[in-house]
Image (cartoon, grey):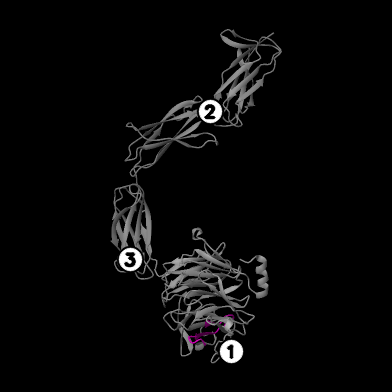
């Protein structure tokens, strides 16, 4: 591998860049992606596809699945590619360095470089009769040249010959760098399509003896076309396909209209005679002279940049646009017509009663008489599908059958045509909502209130079902920090009951779920139970405890401030409410209620202040108020009263 500086120096001296080859491991299954497509050619001998990227100076090689297997870099503006008849050599036309580059098709190493004495081109290349044919020149002075790989430049003979387009009978010949095409089944035949002006000319040349001879010539006069952007030899006929649409026959030195395919603008003709045509955002496959496609492929939102047939007609390779550029895609089964199959079942039906399914099998290529369809029913009792009796379509392609679904719920009927020699397999389905009976399901303890931490038994009761006797019980405590959790799944007992225990530390929604079976509908019920907080309070700064009457009081000197410490179940942002009442005129009367925040340990200490007078009775309690205390995860809970007495 040359260093970067050495490669740059050589590029200056020889107008070429250094070449590097990197193998792409098959494990990565990378695709060949190019940003500016140049040539696209298929090597049938090696079962490889080559594409050049003009913007990045690369040639990429894929296998027949479209997986990248090798790449060559440093190839500048490789505008077109062709492969030798034996598949061993890949040739690239480089318009920037004015040369034909020969590469080993197995590893993409450069084998030879053939300079072309032109300042415009070469542009297009094709291989026929042992030579590489290329076009070159500007719009007003185009011509045809060739490279004979059998000639060794060291012998003193130049393998490159220029100015080979026949001038006899063609006026001034072709203008511009013309398109070229060959057919491996017709060695020595070369199609030439002029480009660049609306009155483009075209020709078919005989190059079998190494010197081009004119077989047919069309002087562009709008009678056959209005500009040429694509030309292909038609397999099995003395015709060319122009712009992917028009078939022009050649005979007696000239061309004439022979028919047309529906509108397209780029195509490739396979050895079998099938046509792969780019038509908008589709690639259409036509049999010779047909007007309806055998098969179509979607290319997404953009047209394909180019198409090329595999030699065995097993697939078509297309350059399909994507977010990263154009990707080589292998389109398989191009010779198989894809039928249309419909399935129409009723939207709803009653379990254990007969229903009718209808549909139709049709194709743009006639189907064989007596085409057979297979039918599968998928339901809750046969989740993997149950085969039903097959059926034969009628002469018009329609069919119908009856069936009695044993299970309710979603029942899917799938109809399949296995395909034949000319048609791909196809399958379609439709779903019926089959009725199921309702069952009963209940859950106790709804609306009940429990002390904090109580273990509560929730019992679900399930009514009549068919086979499924399982019930799942979920607990969903209030608060965003906890989610719904499955606490038990079990079959109900002989009485139809199943029980689960919930630790009631918060208000909690408990859900019982019966998932249904083939004859009974699913059922879900909910029960919401409520939980108090755990709350207590402690009094300090008193000098004694003593009863007044039957009530125990905490005794304080009149100038001492009592401290009340509340302990409450913690929750982020939670506050306690402290209620204060004073006894006078023979009754307890509210003096104040105030909220105080809890620490993360759940405690809140409040100093009440000294009253400064004796003989005063007071009482105080902590309260959690759902909503007002800063959250709604528990139910309102009142702590016990603590009684205070102030003496001298």
Q: Are marks 1 and 3 in contact (CB under 8 Å)?
A: no
Circle 1 is placed at which residue position?
172
Residue at the location (36% across, 58% down)? Answer: 344
Residue at the location (56% across, 32% down)? Answer: 632
- Across and down, in percent, residue 35 comes to 58, 66
Looking at the rendering, in which quadrant would you find the N terminus?
bottom right
Residue 298: tell me if it is visible.
no
Could you tell which of marks 2 and 1 lies nearer the N-terminus?
Answer: 1
- Across and down, in percent, residue 504 comes to 49, 28
Mark 3 element type = loop
Mark 1 element type = loop
10 Å neighbourhood of mark 3: few (<14), some, or many (≥20)? some
In the displayed orientation, state which residue is furthest to the front. Answer: 155
Mark 2 element type = loop
Looking at the rendering, in which quadrant would you find the C terminus?
top right
Q: Which residues are magenta?
A: 192-211
Residue 208: tell me if it is visible.
yes
Which disc, if any, is residue 635? Answer: 2
Nearest the viewer among 7 and 94 is 7
Cα separation between marks 3 and 2: 69 Å
The answer to whether residue 599 is above or below residue 246 is: above
Q: Which of the 4 image quadrants contains residue 499?
A: top left
The answer to whether residue 79 is above or below residue 508 is: below
Disc number lying in front (1 or 3):
1
10 Å neighbourhood of mark 2: few (<14), some, or many (≥20)? many
Q: Are marks 3 and 2 in contact (CB under 8 Å)?
A: no
Circle 3 is placed at which residue position?
397
Cα separation between marks 2 and 1: 101 Å
């Amino acid at each position: 591998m040359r260093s970067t500086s050495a490669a740059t120096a050589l590029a200056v001296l020889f107008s070429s860049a250094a070449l590097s080859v990197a193998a792409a491991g098959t494990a990565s299954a990378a695709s060949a992606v190019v940003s500016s497509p140049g040539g696209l050619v298929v090597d049938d001998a090696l079962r490889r596809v080559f594409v050049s990227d003009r913007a990045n100076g690369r040639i990429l090689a894929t296998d027949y699945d479209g997986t990248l297997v090798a790449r060559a870099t440093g190839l500048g503006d490789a505008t077109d590619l062709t492969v030798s008849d034996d598949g061993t050599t890949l040739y690239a036309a480089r318009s920037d360095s004015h040369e034909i580059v020969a590469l080993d098709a197995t590893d993409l190493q450069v084998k030879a470089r053939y300079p072309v004495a032109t300042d415009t081109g070469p542009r297009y290349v094709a291989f026929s009769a042992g030579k590489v044919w290329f076009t070159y020149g500007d719009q007003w002075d185009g011509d045809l040249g060739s490279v004979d790989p059998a000639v060794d430049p060291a012998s003193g003979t130049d393998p490159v010959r220029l100015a080979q387009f026949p001038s006899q009978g063609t006026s001034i010949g072709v203008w511009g760098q013309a398109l070229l095409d060959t057919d491996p089944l017709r060695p020595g035949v070369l199609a030439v399509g002029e480009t660049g002006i609306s009155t483009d000319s075209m020709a078919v040349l005989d190059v079998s003896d190494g010197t081009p001879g004119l077989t047919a010539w069309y002087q562009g006069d709008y009678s056959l076309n209005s500009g040429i952007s694509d030309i292909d030899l038609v397999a099995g006929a003395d015709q060319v396909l122009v712009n992917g649409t028009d078939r022009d026959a050649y005979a007696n030195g000239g061309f004439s209209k022979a028919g047309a395919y529906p509108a397209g603008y780029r195509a490739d003709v396979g050895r079998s005679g099938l046509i792969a045509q780019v038509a908008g955002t589709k690639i259409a496959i036509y049999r010779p002279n047909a007007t309806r496609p055998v098969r179509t492929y979607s290319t997404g939102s953009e047209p394909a940049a180019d198409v090329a047939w595999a030699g065995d007609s097993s697939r078509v390779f297309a350059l399909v646009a994507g977010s990263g550029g154009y990707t080589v895609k292998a389109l398989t089964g191009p010779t198989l017509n894809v039928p249309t199959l419909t399935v129409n079942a009723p939207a709803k039906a009653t379990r254990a009663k007969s229903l009718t399914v209808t549909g139709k099998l049709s194709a743009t290529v006639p189907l064989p008489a007596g085409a057979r369809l297979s039918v599968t029913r998928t339901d809750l009792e046969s989740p993997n599908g149950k085969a039903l009796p097959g059926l034969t379509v009628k002469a018009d392609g329609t069919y119908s059958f009856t069936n009695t679904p044993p299970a309710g719920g979603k029942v899917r009927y799938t109809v399949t045509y296995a395909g034949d020699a000319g048609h791909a397999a196809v399958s379609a389905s439709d779903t019926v909502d089959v009725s199921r009976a309702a069952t009963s399901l209940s859950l106790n303890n709804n609306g009940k209130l429990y002390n904090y931490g109580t273990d509560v038994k929730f019992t679900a009761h399930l009514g009549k079902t068919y086979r499924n006797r399982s019930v799942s019980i979920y607990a969903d405590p209030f608060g965003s920090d906890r989610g719904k959790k499955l606490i038990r799944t079990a079959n109900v007992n002989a009485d139809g009951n199943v029980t689960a225990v919930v630790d009631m530390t918060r208000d909690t929604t408990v859900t019982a779920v019966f998932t249904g079976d083939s004859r009974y509908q699913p059922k879900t019920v909910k029960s919401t139970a409520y939980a108090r907080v755990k709350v207590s309070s402690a009094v300090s700064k008193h000098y004694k405890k003593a009863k007044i009457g039957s009530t125990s009081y905490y005794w304080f000197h009149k100038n001492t401030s009592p401290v009340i410490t509340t302990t409450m179940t913690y929750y982020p942002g939670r506050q306690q409410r402290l209620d204060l009442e004073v006894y006078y005129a023979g009754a307890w009367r509210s003096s104040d209620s105030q909220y105080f925040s809890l620490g993360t340990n759940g405690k809140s200490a409040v100093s009440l202040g000294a009253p400064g007078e004796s003989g005063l009775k007071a009482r105080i309690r902590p309260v959690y108020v759902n909503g007002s205390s800063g959250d709604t995860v528990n139910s309102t809970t009142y702590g016990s009263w603590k009684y205070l007495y102030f003496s001298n």
